[in-house]
Image: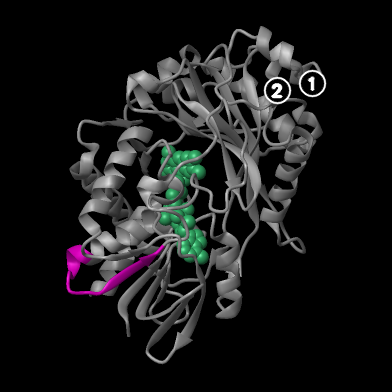
C-alpha cells in the first residue's frame, strides 16, 4: 500500500479528517487528493468590472480547492443538530454536538480567536416570532467571516502540509476495490491505500453517484430546496442580526402548508454567484472586518420540495429550474419585490431608481417566469410574514435574486461509523448527503479519523 489513508477532497470534511488523523496517529501515511487549486491559487475571476459574470473556469475556485466550498464562505459554523445535516442520526446528538464544539476550538486556535459566538438561548425574539407563526430554530453560531475563515484555513494548511501529502489540481477519476484496500485512480497516476475517505462535497456530487454505481453502494435522493436570495437594507434585520447574527426561521404557508425557511443570513454582506456543474445559482457571504462590510443584509428563502414515486431525480428538477433562469437572464435574475407583486419585470432603470444598491451585478428580469407558482407563492407569503417581525422586509425595493437552489447530494448508505458497505471506505461531508454545512462536514471528518486511527 502506498498510503494508509487516502482522502478525496480537501473541503472541511477532508481537512478535519486529515487533521484528526495526524493528532491521533502521526505515523500514519496520509494523502489528500483535491480537484481544485491550493488555497493561495484560488481566485474567482469575477471582479465586478472587467469580468462581471461567471466565465465557467475549468475548475471553479469558489467551489473547489483547499477549503472546499467553504473557503470563501461566510465562515458561519452553526453548532446545532436542528439544521445543517443529520449527522446526529448516525452518531448520536451529544457526540455530534461535542465534535462541532471540538472543531470550533480548533478554529479558534488557528486564527479564529476573538470572533463572536452568537446564541439563540434566552432571546426574546423567539416569542415575537411565535406570535406571528414564525419558528426560530435553536443554535449557537460562530461567525468567522470570509476574511478570518481564510486565515484559519491558511494556518491549518501550514500545520498539515509537512505531515500529510497534498495533491492539488488532481481530480480522482475512480476508486476501485483491491485486495486489502483501494486503488485510487487519477488522470496520470494510480495510488493505493488501506482506508479511503471520500469527502467530495456538492461539486463532486455527480462523481460520487458514479462511484456508488461502480461499487454498488445503495443511495437515495428525493429532496431539493428552491427559492431566492433576499437583499435589503441592513437596518431592517439589525435588531435580529446584532443579537443572533444568523437566524433560521421556519414558516408554514397558509395556501399549501409548505415549509419556507430563512437560510444563510449575511448581515452587511454581499450576494455572490455559485457555479455547480456549470449551472449558475446565487449565494451570499459577509466579512468579519467592518471595512469590507456593505450596507445590505442578505439571506435565502427556500421552499423544500420532496418527491415521491416514481420521480427520483430531485436535483435534476432543481437544475432545470436554475437552467431556466440562466437561459432567460444569462445567469442570475434580479427583481424588486414591488415589481414581482405587480406582475412586471424589473428593468435596469427600475433597479437604478431603487433606494437599495444591489451587491451583485445580475440581470433585471421576472422571477415569475422561472419559479413554479407554488414556490413563488410560498416565498411571497413568507416575505409578508417576516415583515411583521422585521418591518421593511416587504418594501417594494427589497431585492430578490434567483434562483437559489440547495442541492442535496443523494444520501449514500453508510453505517453508524460512516463506513460504506465496503470495509475501509468512508463517505463523509456534504458528498454523503448526510451533512449540509461547515460544522457538520468538519465534525464528520473528525469522527471517521478517530474510527480509522483506532
Ligand atoms: C458561497 C458559499 C457560502 C457558504 N456559506 C456557508 C456558511 O456560512 N456556513 C455553512 O455551514 N456552510 C456554508 N456553505 C456550505 C459549506 O461550504 C459546505 O457545507 C461545506 O464546505 C461542505 O464541506 P465538504 O468538505 O463536505 O465539501 P466541500 O467543501 O464541497 O469540499 C469538497 C472538495 O472535494 C473536491 N472534489 C470534488 N470531486 C473531487 C474528485 N473527484 N477528486 C478530488 N477532489 C474532488 C472539491 O474540489 C472540493 O474542494 C457555503 C457554501 C457556499 C458555496
Q: Residue at x 50, y 40 (%)?
A: 44
- Up the image or down, 26 lies above or below 271; here it is below
- Up the image or down, 443 lies above or below 139; here it is below
> In this figure, which residue is indicated by the disc labeled 1?
345
Q: Is the CB–ligand 1 distance for label 2 below 8 Å?
A: no
Residue 137 located within the stretch drawn in magenta: no
Residue 32 located within the stretch drawn in magenta: yes
Q: Is the CB–ligand 1 distance for label 1 below 8 Å?
A: no
SS assignment at label 2: strand
- Up the image or down, 330 lies above or below 305; here it is above
Q: Residues within 10 Å of mark 1 (few under 14, many from 20)?
A: some
| Residues in magenta, as a range | 22-33
* Nearer to me, 101 or 288: 288
Q: Residue at x 69, y 48 (%)?
A: 318
The answer to the question of whether label 1 and label 2 lie on touching residues, with beta carbons closer than 8 A, is yes
Would residue 29 be found to the left or right of residue 185 on screen?
A: left
Query: Residue 4 — which label?
Result: none
Query: Residue 335 — which label?
Result: 2
Q: How many marks?
A: 2
Across and down, in percent, residue 332 comes to 67, 33
Across and down, in percent, residue 62 comes to 49, 44
Would residue 11 be found to the left or right of residue 158 on screen?
A: right
From this viewpoint, is residue 431 visible? no
Residue occupying the far bottom of the picture: 179
Q: CA distance from mark 1 to mark 2?
A: 7 Å
Amino acid at each position: 500500500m502506498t498510503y494508509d489513508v487516502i482522502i478525496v477532497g480537501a473541503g472541511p470534511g477532508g481537512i478535519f479528517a486529515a487533521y484528526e488523523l495526524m493528532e491521533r496517529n502521526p505515523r500514519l501515511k496520509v494523502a489528500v487528493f483535491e480537484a481544485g487549486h491550493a488555497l493561495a491559487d484560488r481566485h474567482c475571476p469575477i471582479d465586478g468590472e472587467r469580468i462581471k459574470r461567471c466565465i465557467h473556469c475549468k475548475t471553479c475556485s469558489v467551489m473547489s480547492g483547499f477549503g472546499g466550498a467553504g473557503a470563501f464562505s461566510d465562515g458561519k459554523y452553526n453548532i446545532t443538530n436542528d439544521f445543517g445535516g443529520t449527522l446526529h442520526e448516525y452518531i448520536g446528538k451529544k457526540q455530534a454536538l461535542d465534535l462541532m464544539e471540538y472543531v470550533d476550538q480548533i478554529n479558534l486556535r488557528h486564527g479564529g480567536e476573538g470572533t463572536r459566538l452568537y446564541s439563540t438561548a434566552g432571546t426574546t425574539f423567539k416569542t415575537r416570532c411565535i406570535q406571528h407563526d414564525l419558528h426560530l430554530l435553536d443554535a449557537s453560531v460562530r461567525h468567522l467571516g470570509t476574511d478570518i475563515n481564510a486565515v484559519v484555513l491558511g494556518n491549518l494548511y501550514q500545520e498539515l502540509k509537512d505531515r500529510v501529502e497534498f495533491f492539488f489540481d488532481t481530480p480522482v477519476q475512480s476508486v476501485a476495490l483491491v485486495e486489502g484496500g483501494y486503488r485510487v485512480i487519477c488522470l496520470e497516476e494510480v495510488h493505493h491505500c488501506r482506508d479511503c475517505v471520500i469527502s467530495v462535497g456538492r461539486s463532486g456530487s455527480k462523481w460520487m453517484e458514479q462511484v456508488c454505481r461502480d461499487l454498488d453502494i445503495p443511495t437515495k435522493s428525493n429532496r431539493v430546496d428552491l427559492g431566492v436570495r433576499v437583499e435589503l437594507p441592513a437596518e431592517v434585520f439589525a435588531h435580529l442580526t446584532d443579537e443572533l447574527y444568523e437566524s433560521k426561521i421556519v414558516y408554514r404557508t397558509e395556501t399549501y402548508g409548505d415549509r419556507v425557511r430563512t437560510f444563510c443570513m449575511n448581515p452587511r454582506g454581499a450576494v455572490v454567484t455559485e457555479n455547480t456543474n456549470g449551472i449558475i445559482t446565487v449565494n451570499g457571504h459577509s466579512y468579519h472586518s467592518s471595512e469590507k462590510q456593505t450596507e445590505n443584509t442578505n439571506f435565502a428563502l427556500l421552499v423544500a420540495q420532496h418527491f415521491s414515486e416514481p420521480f427520483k431525480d430531485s436535483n435534476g428538477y432543481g437544475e432545470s429550474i436554475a437552467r431556466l433562469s440562466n437561459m432567460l437572464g444569462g445567469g442570475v435574475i434580479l427583481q424588486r419585490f414591488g415589481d414581482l407583486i405587480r406582475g412586471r419585470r424589473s428593468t435596469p432603470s427600475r433597479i437604478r431608481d431603487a433606494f437599495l444598491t444591489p451587491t451583485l451585478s445580475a440581470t433585471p428580469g421576472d422571477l415569475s417566469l422561472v419559479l413554479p407558482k407554488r414556490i413563488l407563492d410560498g416565498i411571497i407569503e413568507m416575505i409578508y410574514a417576516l415583515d411583521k417581525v422585521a418591518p421593511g422586509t416587504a418594501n417594494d425595493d427589497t431585492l430578490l435574486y434567483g434562483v437559489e437552489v440547495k442541492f442535496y447530494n443523494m444520501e449514500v448508505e453508510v453505517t453508524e461509523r460512516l463506513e460504506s458497505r465496503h470495509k475501509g471506505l468512508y463517505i463523509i461531508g456534504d458528498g454523503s448527503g448526510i451533512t449540509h454545512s461547515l460544522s457538520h462536514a468538519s465534525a464528520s471528518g473528525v469522527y471517521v479519523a478517530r474510527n480509522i486511527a483506532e
